[in-house]
Image (cartoon, rainbow, N blue to C red):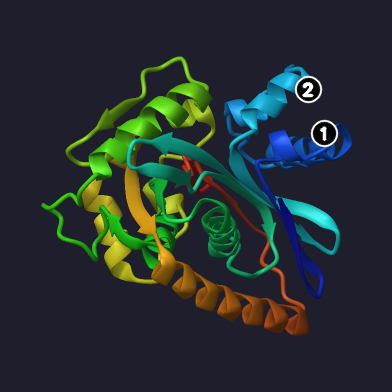
Amino acid sequence: MKKINTINSFKSIHYMNPGKELDDLEFSKMRKELVTINESSRSPVKNNFLIAGNTLEENRKLYDSCVIALMYFEDEAFGFLISPIIHCSHGPILHAGLVIINKNPGANCISYPAIQNMILAYESLGTIYSTNISSTPSIIESFDNIVHKAWPSPSQNAKLIPKNYKDVVKALEDEYIKKYFVTDDLVEIDSRRFTMSSNSNGMGFSTNFYKLARAEKFIYQTFCMTWIDHSKGEDIVQVGKIGFLTNLYQRGLLFMLKISLLKLKKKGSGSGHETSKKEDTSKTKVSKIA
C-alpha cells in the first residue's frame, strides 16, 4: 500500500510494508532516499535500516514489516520516519521509529508523518499498540498528544503501569532494539521506569539535554529532566494504544496540520531546523526518537 499527500510545495509519501509491496526499482529508489537523507544530516545515525552493503533481498527483508514516510519540499527530500511493525501476544505494535529531518520548512514535521503512519497502520491492522523511544521533550510531548493513554508521561499516573504495557516493551526490546540497533555496547531496558540505557553518542545522538528540541508545554521539559539521566544516554520508552476513537482524533489533528501546511506556503517561510531521533524513534540527537 502506498499513499501520496501533496499540499502546495510539500509532499509526503507513505509506504506500508515496502519490502513486500514495491517492485525492485521503486524499492531501491525509496531506500536510496532514506540513506541520502541520513548521510547528509549533521549527525548520521547508525541503524540496521540504513546499513550499507546489503543485497537487495536482505534490504527487502528489513523493510517487509514497517511503515515508511518520506517528506519533500519543492521536490527535494528533506526528512523521513521509519516505523517498524512488531508483533506480540496482545496484538500488533507500531513503533514510532527513526526520524530525521534535515531542513524543516517550518511545519510540524514530527507529528505529521507520525500521524499519517499510524492512520495507515490502523487501516491495515485494526487496533494497535504504539511505542516511542526518545529523550527529546518535543517528541515525548508529541507522542503523548497523538496516542491514547501514553505511559510514562506527565499526563498519567506515574506509579500505575497500564495493563499489557510491560509485555509490549519486552516485545519491542526483542523484535526491534536487539535486531536494528547498531552498537557495541549493551542496550538495557528498565521495565520498572520504562527507560532504555545505551551508547547514544556512539549511535549518532546528542546527550546534551539543553540542545534537544524543546516541548511547547514546560511540564514535558521537567518530566524529561526528572525521569531520565540524559548524561548517561537514557531514553524514555513510551507505550500507547490506537483504537477507533483515537484514529478519529488523529484524523482531526491531521486536518489541522494540513491547514498549517497551507498557511506555511502562503508565508513562504522556512526554518532550516534539523532534527534526528533515535528510535529509537527513537532518539533525537540532534533530536531523538526511536
Q: CA distance from mark 2 to mark 1?
A: 8 Å
Nearer to us in this view, 16 or 240: 16
Badge number at residue 56 = 2
Nearer to us in this view, 10 or 241: 241
- Amino acid type, callout 2: Leu
Is 43 drawn above or below residue 267 in the view shown?
A: above
Most distant residue in the right direction: 25
Q: Residue at x 59, y 36 (%)?
A: 65
Going from the N terminus, do you reach mark 2 or mark 1 first? Answer: 1
Within-10-Å neighbours for mark 1: few <14, some 14–19, many 20+: some
Q: Is residue 232 visible?
A: no
**Secondary structure beneath label 1:** helix
The picture quadrant where one finds residue 60 is: top right
Nearer to us in this view, 36 or 226: 36
Number of marks: 2
Within-10-Å neighbours for mark 2: few <14, some 14–19, many 20+: few
Q: Is residue 79 visible?
A: yes
- Amino acid type, callout 1: Ser
The picture quadrant where one finds residue 112 is: bottom right
Instruction: Decide if residue 94 is on the left or right side of residue 23.
Output: left
Q: Residue at x 31, y 62 (%)?
A: 220
Most distant residue in the left direction: 159
Instruction: Decide if residue 169 is on the left or right side of residue 213.
Output: left
Badge number at residue 78 = none
Nearer to us in this view, 100 or 165: 165
Is 156 drawn above or below residue 236 in the view shown?
A: below
**Secondary structure beneath label 2:** helix
Does the residue at mark 2 contact the one at mark 1 (Cβ under 8 Å)? yes
The picture quadrant where one finds residue 222 is: bottom left
On the image, numbered disc 1 is attached to which residue? 28
Is 267 drawn above or below residue 32 in the view shown?
A: below
